[in-house]
Image (cartoon, rainbow, N blue to C red):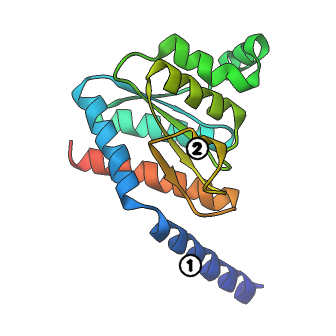
Amino acid sequence: MSKKLNNFIKKYESNFVSILKKIQKKDILNLCNQILDVKKKKSKIMIFGNGAGASIASHFANDLTNTSGIRAMSYDNTAQITCLSNDYLFQNWVKKIINFYANNNDLVILLSASGNSKNMINAAKFCKKKKINYFSITGFKKQNKLNLNSSNKIWINSLSYNYVEMSQLFILLSIVDFFNKNN
């Protein structure tokens, strides 16, 4: 079993490194520049995800605010999510949060492994309509619906939820470390 597990881990690591190397660094730089702009304007970042994406969003928001002083907020309060989902449907709760709390010069970040989460797609369309700056980080098919609705995006070339989510976390926490060291 240990040899089989060792081989699996080596292959898993190799696959992950290969996926990370394919991510366009210019897209990560674009996100960093937009975060720097938020900092200069003393605005905030609003980040959203579903499931594991929500925990990634929370981790990023907490660490970025704590280490760099850049205001970042995730929305993973179950009472708020269920209230808005009940009143406006699940596919609209992110859009409603943005409508309630976003200001000019804020940056919205939308995480979706598949890029086909209706609540994230509706949020992107709302941001576009209201001229709110937003950025998406997705995986799976390059032509996913969130990618198609985002001019600012990072696409992760993988069909695996775990690889996409680990890549999202890697990207966002590397940005946290960059701003922490260069604050």
- The kind of secondary structure element at disc 1 is helix
The image quadrant of residue 53 is: top right
Viewer-proximal residue, 168 or 107?
Answer: 107
Say whether residue 108 is left or right of residue 26.
right
Q: Is residue 91 above or below residue 2?
A: above
Q: At which x and y percent is residue 64?
A: 37, 38
Residue type for callout 1: Ser
Viewer-proximal residue, 13 or 159?
Answer: 159
The image quadrant of residue 99 is: top right
Q: Quadrant of the C terminus?
A: top left
Q: At which x and y percent is residue 36?
A: 27, 38
Q: Residue furthest bottom?
A: 3
Residue name at image x 48 percent, y 46 percent: 153
Residue under numbered circle 2 = 148
Say whether residue 19 is left or right of residue 11.
left
Residue type for callout 2: Leu
Residue under numbered circle 1 = 14
Residue name at image x 63 percent, y 52 percent: 143
Residue 77 visible (yes or no): no
